[in-house]
Image (cartoon, helix red, strand yellow):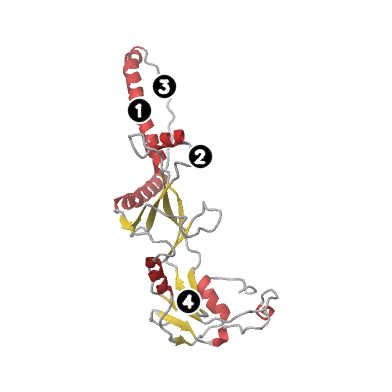
Amino acid sequence: MSDTPDVAMGDSSIYASAGQPATQYGLPDDEIAAELPVFLTHKLAKSLHMLVYPQKEHATKPGLINPTVARIKPIHRQIELDIPLDVQSPMYNKERGRELGEGISDVGRLLDTQTLVSVDIPKNSTYLAGVVRNGELHLTPVECLTQLRPSLKYLDRLAEKQKAASKIHDDNEDAEAEDDKDKDAKAQTIQVTVRSAEAEEALRQQQNSIAYIQQKLEEEPWSKLAYHDVGSEESALVAEKLVATNRESLLCKTTPDEYLTAVIGNMNPDIL
């Protein structure tokens, strides 16, 4: 392909003509209804993220995800969305919500926000976002495929508070029992586990690597994101960048199978 931001797949031989039987291309017997010219644009290729909501049973409709706060760590490509919870719903347990709210506040606040945090999905193939406009198919490569899952950091904070309170209680008990231990010292059996030097080094490198990555992630500051849902003026302006403006045609020098393999990886030769 050329270095132009938008390109058209101009060789009509790669298209199936309307009305031809699909069996000719190894597909089930279903008549091909239309032939669409394909355009590839890279205007948003470096910033287009596909967000997947695995906790949602159905497709996410516009307006259902309406975060009060959105933020991103651009270097590590981590995204967080704060979604308000309906604490007035009869299904909301306020007693439990107040208990869990101690993980986000010390003033008896209800847990009224669910934070969704991104988890990158390894790309086993190339994903494309497609828009059909005026009988043309416009494709943009997806930079990152991300799942948004509920963050449970408030449970970690709650556990830390409980652990701190328990430690204070244990310290008091230890102080009272210290004299008894001095008076009645007993021999204890100690089990020693010996690892080889190679195993110790491998474990150390693994722990350091994970700790290093986590440290760098924590050190990167959050950048505020402006969230605009489908239907907004801002969303419409960005969506226009998914449509190619350059109509330069390219001569296809590969077969349909070779082209699709280059785009999506190895494929069954009997299935397009």
Tag 2 secondary structure: loop
| Cα distance in 3D space between marks 4 and 1 | 59 Å
Q: Which residue is mark 3?
A: 188
Q: Nearer the viewer, mark 2 or mark 3?
A: 2
Please report whichever mark, 3 or 1, sits nearer to the chain's N-terminal start.
Answer: 1
Q: Is residue 225 above or below residue 13?
A: above
Q: Which residue is mark 4?
A: 138
Q: Residue at x 42, y 51 (%)?
A: 116
Quarter of the figure that contains the N terminus: bottom left
Q: Nearer the viewer, mark 4 or mark 1?
A: 4
Tag 4 secondary structure: strand
Q: Which residue is mark 2?
A: 90
Q: Residue at x 57, y 83 (%)?
A: 15
Q: Nearer the viewer, mark 2 or mark 4?
A: 2
Q: Residue at x 60, y 80 (%)?
A: 34
Label 3 CA crowd tier, 10 Å (few <14, some 14–19, many 20+): few
- Residue type at mark 3? Gln
- Depth check: give the residue in front, 210 or 199: 210
| Cα distance in 3D space between marks 3 and 1 | 29 Å
- Residue type at mark 4? His
| Cα distance in 3D space between marks 1 and 2 | 33 Å
The numbered dot on residue 165 is 1
Q: Position of residue 269 (x, y in %)?
A: 62, 74
- Depth check: give the residue in front, 262 or 192: 262
